[in-house]
């Protein structure tokens, strides 16, 4: 039986986000699912470094040995910033697509681009 | 729902579920880890910073952070480039907020900026740092933009000044990171002394990096928000 800890929950969230990315047709919902996948990765990394009753990674806390692992937290900082950057840029691309095809439905956009390519030939 | 789409959903659920079960059982997670290793704590002691996370991402693993700031800058540039090329949307008459909201936003902005400056300056002593402080200041500006309109806020800060500050901060970060190599010291090492732990002026260059990253993130997040408001998508 699997223990219910941060890692297990993060893998579940990752699966839900991946399913959203694959199955949902709305581009904005796809981006939300991408954000969920990223949050799952953050939760996984932070809970890998956590320990029970761990002190925050500050040197002024009395028991320095009982600290949580600071390395995953430092790496997660990059993940958060890059997630923000990727989402902002992806939203701009969705805006450009919507302006051209007047829909956020990925299937309709694919159909219309295929029709455009056929008309070129 | 047609049978092909049901089959698609089933295949996707099976694949993703199998993948998750594979990770959970095959990876051998034993739950939470053993906590901080002594190597990182000793490395943080050498920098003079009290916040071990800051000491890692702004001293030991500075290279990661510099590239991360570059990625952020490229994203801000991409949003700026594509939305400027797209042209402005039809201006919509903004409905003025009530005077309570407007005055409260004006009163809150200096406080929020003060908190963000505190968090940036204490980034090496307590939880916080350039990224969180910059985002707090950017959110404060967003609050006033919601209450007063982006035009009023943009008129308060000249766009030229903001652009120069943003790219100047990025150049400053790159220059600070390259300085040890230029002075024939070990690359990405710290040139400033660690100082007394617990003082503001301690922790070597971490304070400088935090300040520059704070300015960069503050202006970068504001630029992204302003462009999204100015160039609304339409369906």
Image: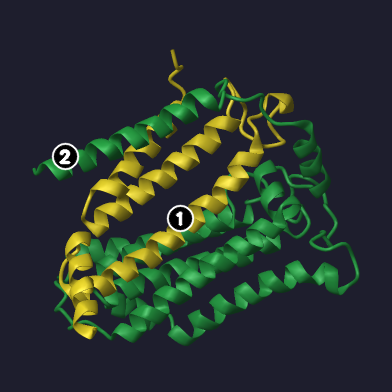
Which residue: 76% across, 37% down?
B41
* Visual hue assigned to chain A: yellow
In front of the other: B77 or B51: B77
Asked if residue B56 is positioned above or below residue B174 in the image, the reply reads above
Residue B164: % across, % down: 55, 83
Q: Quadrant of the N terminus of chain B?
A: top left
Q: Nearer the viewer, residue B208 or B225?
A: B225
Q: Which residue is mark 2?
A: B6
- Of all chains, the one bearing label 2 is B
Q: Quadrant of residue A66?
A: top right
Classify residue A120 as left or right of residue B129.
left
In the rendered image of this protein, does residue B196 appear above or below residue B165?
above
Residue lying furthest right: B184
Q: Please identify the residue farthest to the left as the structure is shown.
A: B1
Q: Quadrant of residue A90?
A: bottom left
Give the image location of residue B11, x and y in percent: 28, 38
Within-10-Å neighbours for mark 2: few <14, some 14–19, many 20+: few
SS type, badge 2: helix
Identify the residue shown where x is 50% and y is 35%: A44
Q: Residue B198 has which mark?
A: none
Answer left or right for B188 relative to B99: right
Q: Give the x, y percent position of residue A85.
A: 45, 62
Query: In the rendered image, which quarter contains the C terminus of chain B?
Result: bottom left
The hue in which chain B appears in the rendered picture of the protein: green
| Residue that appears at 24% across and 36% down | B10
Q: Position of residue B71 (x, y in %)?
A: 54, 66
Reading the image, the residue beneath label 1 is: A83
**Chain of the residue under the numbered disc 1 shown in the image:** A
């Amino acid at each position: 039986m699997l223990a219910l800890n941060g890692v297990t929950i993060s893998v579940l969230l990752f699966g839900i986000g991946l399913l959203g990315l694959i199955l949902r047709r709305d581009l904005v919902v796809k981006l939300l699912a991408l954000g969920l996948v990223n949050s799952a990765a953050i939760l996984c990394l932070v809970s890998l470094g956590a320990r029970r009753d761990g002190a925050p990674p500050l040197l002024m806390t009395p028991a320095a040995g009982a600290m949580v692992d600071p390395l995953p937290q430092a790496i997660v900082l990059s993940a958060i910033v890059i997630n923000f950057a990727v989402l902002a840029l992806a939203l701009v691309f969705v805006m450009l697509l919507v302006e051209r095809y007047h829909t956020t439905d990925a299937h309709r956009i694919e159909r219309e681009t295929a029709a455009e390519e056929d008309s070129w030939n | 729902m047609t049978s092909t789409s049901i089959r698609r959903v089933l295949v996707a659920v099976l694949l993703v579920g199998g993948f998750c079960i594979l990770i959970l059982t095959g990876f051998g997670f034993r739950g939470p880890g053993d906590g901080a290793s002594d190597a990182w704590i000793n490395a943080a002691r050498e920098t003079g910073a009290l916040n071990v996370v800051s000491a890692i991402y702004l001293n030991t693993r500075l290279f990661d952070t510099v590239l991360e700031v570059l990625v952020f800058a490229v994203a801000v540039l991409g949003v700026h480039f594509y939305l400027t090329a797209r042209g402005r949307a039809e201006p919509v008459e903004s409905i003025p907020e009530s005077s309570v909201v407007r005055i409260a936003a004006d009163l809150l902005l200096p406080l929020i900026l003060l908190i963000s400056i505190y968090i940036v300056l204490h980034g090496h002593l307590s939880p916080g740092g350039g990224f969180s402080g910059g985002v707090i200041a950017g959110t404060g500006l967003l609050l006033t933009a919601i209450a007063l309109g982006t035009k009023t806020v943009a008129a308060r800060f000249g766009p030229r000044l903001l652009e120069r500050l943003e790219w100047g901060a990025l150049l400053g970060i790159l220059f600070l990171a390259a300085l040890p190599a230029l002075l024939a010291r070990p690359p990405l090492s710290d040139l400033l002394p660690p100082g007394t732990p617990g003082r503001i002026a301690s922790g070597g260059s971490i304070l400088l990096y935090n300040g520059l990253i704070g300015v960069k993130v503050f202006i970068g997040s504001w630029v992204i928000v302003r462009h999204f408001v100015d160039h609304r998508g339409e369906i």
